[in-house]
Image (cartoon, rainbow, N blue to C red):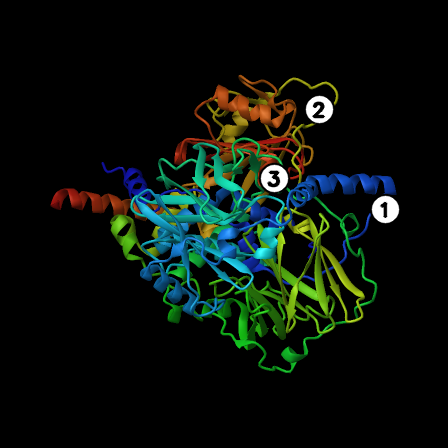
Amino acid sequence: MVDADAVILDELGRLAPLGGFEGADWRDVLRRASVALPVTLPRRRRVAWHRRLAIGLAALVALGVLAVAVALAAGGLRRFSAWLTGSPGKPAPAAVQSGFAHRNAAAFAQFPLGTRVRLIARASVTGKTFDLLGFRTGSSLCLRVVRADLPAGRGHNQCASLGELEQSAAPAVVLDDAWFSFGKPAVSATGIYGFADDTVKRIEVVRERSGTQSVPVTSNAFLVLIGHPSGTAANPSPQDAITGVFAVLGNGSRIRLAYIAGGGVTTQAPPPKPPFYMAFTRITPAQLPGPTKPTTRFAGGTISWLSQRKPVGEPYTLPARARHYFGTVLFARAVQPDPTQPDRIVFMIVRLAHHAFGPTTSTKPGLCFSPIEALGSLGGISCGLQPLSVSPISFTYVWPSQIAHVAGIAADQVAAIKIFLANGRVIPALLRDNAFLADVPQSVASKIVSYDRSGRVLSVAVLNSPPMHYQACPRVVAPPAGSIGPARPWERLDLGNATLNGQPILGDTPAEVMAALGKPAAILRNTVINGVRIPDFLYGGSTQRTGTVQIQFGTNHGRIVAVSMLFHTSRLSEAKLGRILTLQPGHVQRAIEKTYPGFTLSAGYGTLDAHGCLFTLNRGRLGKHVQVTLLAGPGAQRTPELVVRSGY
Amino acid sequence: MSRLRDPRLEEIERLYRDRFPHFVQVARAIVGDRERAVEAVQDGFADAIRGREGFRGEGPLEAWVWRAIVNAAKKATRRPLVEVGREADAEYELAPSVLEASPLVSALPERQRLVVFLRYYAGLDYRSIASALDVEVGTVSASLASAHAAIRKAVKEEEVHG
């Protein structure tokens, strides 16, 4: 007898092994899907002056103003000597130069033709060589990481303005993540690259599993890559999240750098404190220097050259793929606000496809804009029927980078745009032909302000605030009030063998579940599969709000069977761990790992971003798969909630 | 830019952060290499975000997102000329690397192949697979049974002839 499951698993393991989170970038997804939203003034809270002062001081300290003060007191601007002299590294080999020229020629956001790249460093990882290339164009210092054997490849490309680097709070800046995947079986090379000033000798990267990696700084730049197998379906490669990036100075001191993971990274232990990973806090305009509200009313904006379809900037052709999504482009031009920076902003008049932004999308011609980053062809497209009718500016970010490129469009009425940082710096945006750009460090809270020709404030908005804010995860869950009654049959769980009241439950039919747990208080029939209503059993209460245990059913080969069990009751009693929903979530996670070593932790409680308020453990595959998830905090309907589900 | 809280967007984000490797794995099985698979996943999620208002709750949101990912991956396998104006139910082209790595699974008809991917890589139940591929649950069951039968037959033939 042929075991088809085994054959399929074997083939699928070769075809596409389960990899890690390399390439995950939620912000990139948002960028691709973005819709222009008006810049509005966040509602100002009434805060007593002394409390406001306390908040302001706390924010400023947290955001590194002291570091800036120390840095500036110690000797003014940071120095990047190798770049100031114009000759970092050495000339790139002919093939590398040719590859860059090929890629540059094919890109919309081009560097000046004839740009010469320099070879800064080479790293060999798992049999592949990677080049760290550098070049300067105007005020931009640019780095490019590319496979040595594919010099015309897309690679990873980021630029930062010299001014921004010189005024950085830290002696080194991680520009971006780099990741590559190649070979059979697949191997991944992942890491970071960036700039370091003259005082930095080495960069150390600390990873959760593989420990510390140290690389020398070469010509004020660094590339840190590590290789690891991409894993197989049966043996996935465990994540190895970066948990620390340090600059080691010539005097031996070690300074932690701000770092934003590319996205989707999970850590098994709680992540380091900000500014590492930059946990954004809610900041109001009043807590930052500069104007706090408009001083004049904005009655509606226009972009005259666009409405008259004048050939400003360069012609632009939207890639076919994007046309398919967005509709018919009636007019498109690319504007380069700063001739010394490659970034362009595309203005388009588009007759949107009816499905472009959901079923309510109007198909009248509207204005869309899109930033194009270095060597790229298109960023996310932001559209609004009349985005400038309600707001003087609309903007987006070119991510990922520790120094964000804020890119946007401005109405004719806007004469200047400035970014005010928490540390007191003011960055003027480059504004040309209604397009603007600004390099803004993400480690410092900031706000963007637009002005008219008379210097009156048209709009104020905080950068990096609500969209980047993730709900805080409670480390401590309040214990249940009052006494807890004894566990009832449906509240006696054994995670060791995934049983409830000593019965398997998962995989059982409704009749078997009823025989094991008794008659439910209510049976919900909200799900219909092939015309058959699938039940959910509620125990401990007759509604989803009052029920304490819910058994959910699904179908398997035509049979209706239980597929998951949801518990949200302090009465829940686990065979070895007792009343686990009265314990702190982190403690429950560790206790399950220790007591039931068959479970593997896939996301730890209190780790990054959206993972913050749950942990997930898995055991077995397919028919024997059991997943345990505990949700606590703002993401849960009621706190806490334990879910045990099975792939039947 | 200020944004209002959007629970559905948050749920899609949670899926992304929880299951990114699995989405990439399925996309890679379709497109043949990881780089394009990541692109497809990014595009698929962007599609899902753009169209989230159209989600009517007729099945799990995860299944609905899977549909977006599968469609984005299928689109990525088509030649640019074919891409414009053609919709997701067109057959996708198998990359040579897929044929080489997985001759038995590659030999399956497209629907069976996708059911296999979603079942084994993504670990979806039949109902979710049905929702992701916009077919009946019975079709999923039948497709998986047919896939198993075809693979058993192919392996037996290999043993006899080979």
Amino acid type at image mark 1: Arg
Same subunit, labels 3 and 2: the answer reads yes
Chain ID at mark 1:
A
Q: Position of residue A66 (x, y in %)?
A: 70, 40
Which residue, given by chain and number where applicable, does mark 1 sit on? A46
Q: Nearer the viewer, mark 1 or mark 3?
A: 1
Q: Nearer the viewer, residue B71 or A60?
A: A60
Q: CA distance from mark 1 to mark 3?
A: 46 Å
> Does residue A307 sit above or below A395 in this rendering?
below
Please identify the quarter of the rendering in which residue B162 is found. top left
Please identify the quarter of the rendering in which residue A139 is found. bottom right
Amino acid type at image mark 3: Leu
Chain ID at mark 3:
A
Marks 1 and 3, the one that precedes in the sequence: 1
Secondary structure beneath disc 3? strand
Q: Position of residue B113 (x, y in %)?
A: 34, 51
Amino acid type at image mark 2: Pro
Q: Which mark is residue A524?
A: 3
Q: Residues within 10 Å of mark 3 (few under 14, many from 20)?
A: some
Q: Residues within 10 Å of mark 2 (few under 14, many from 20)?
A: few
Which residue, given by chain and number where applicable, does mark 2 sit on? A480
Q: Nearer the viewer, mark 2 or mark 1?
A: 1
Marks 3 and 2, the one that precedes in the sequence: 2
Q: CA distance from mark 3 to mark 2?
A: 27 Å
Residue at position x 69%, y 19% in the image: A484
